[in-house]
Image (cartoon, grey):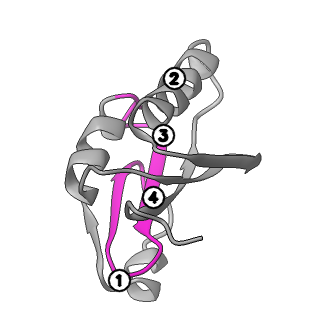
Amino acid sequence: WEPTMPAYWLSYRIHADATREARAKELTDRVKAMAGSSWEDSTSFLIFSSEQNIDAIAQDLKSAINLRTDLIVLCMTEVKAARLAGAVNDEAIFKLMPHIRKV
C-alpha cells in the first residue's frame, strides 16, 4: 500500500480547564475533517493523511486551541517539515528539531 496523500503526525497538549474537552474535540474534529485516513490509538497523538499542505493544516489547527495554554506540534512523516503553535514550556524542541517553525 502506498499513500496517495502526504502523511502527518500531530502531538498536542490541551491545558486542563473548564473548556479543555471542547478544545480537544474541536482539534480532533478538524483533523478528521481534513484527513483522508487517520490513526488515533494513542493519547494526544494522531497520524493522518491530508491533501492540504503543512502550513494550511497548522493554521487551521492553531485556531482550535488556546495559544496561551495549549500546544500543538505538527510534522510531516516523510520530510523534515514541522510546525508548532501555542505555549512552549521547554525551548529544547528548537534545538532538537531545528527545522520546526512556530506559527
Query: Residue drawn 40% across and 30% down?
Result: 66
- In the picture, measured across the screen, residue 69 lies left or right of residue 84, that is right
- Give how far across and how far down residue 86 sits, in percent: 37, 46
Is label 2 in a helix, a strand or a loop? helix
CA–CA distance between discs 4 and 1? 13 Å
What residue sits right under mark 4 in the picture? Answer: 73
- In the picture, measured across the screen, residue 7 lies left or right of residue 40, that is left
CA–CA distance between discs 2 and 4? 15 Å
Nearer to us of marks 4 and 1 is 1
Query: Residue drawn 50% across and 33% down?
Result: 32
What residue sits right under mark 2 in the picture? Answer: 23
- Give how far across and how far down residue 51 sits, in percent: 30, 51
Nearer to us of marks 2 and 3 is 2
The kind of residue on which mark 2 rests is: Arg
Q: Which residues are magenta?
A: 64-88
Residue 24 visible in the shown view: yes
Q: Quadrant of residue 103?
A: bottom left
Viewer-closest of 57 and 15: 57
Given contact means CB atoms under 8 Å apart, are the residues at marks 2 and 3 in contact? yes
CA–CA distance between discs 1 and 3? 23 Å
Q: Quadrant of residue 95?
A: bottom left
What residue sits right under mark 1 in the picture? Answer: 80
Check disc 3: other Cα within 10 Å, few if <14, some if 14-19, many if 20+. Answer: many
Vertical relation: 27 (above or below) 26: below
The kind of residue on which mark 1 rests is: Lys
The disc placed on residue 70 is 3
**Quadrant where the image shows the N terminus:** bottom right
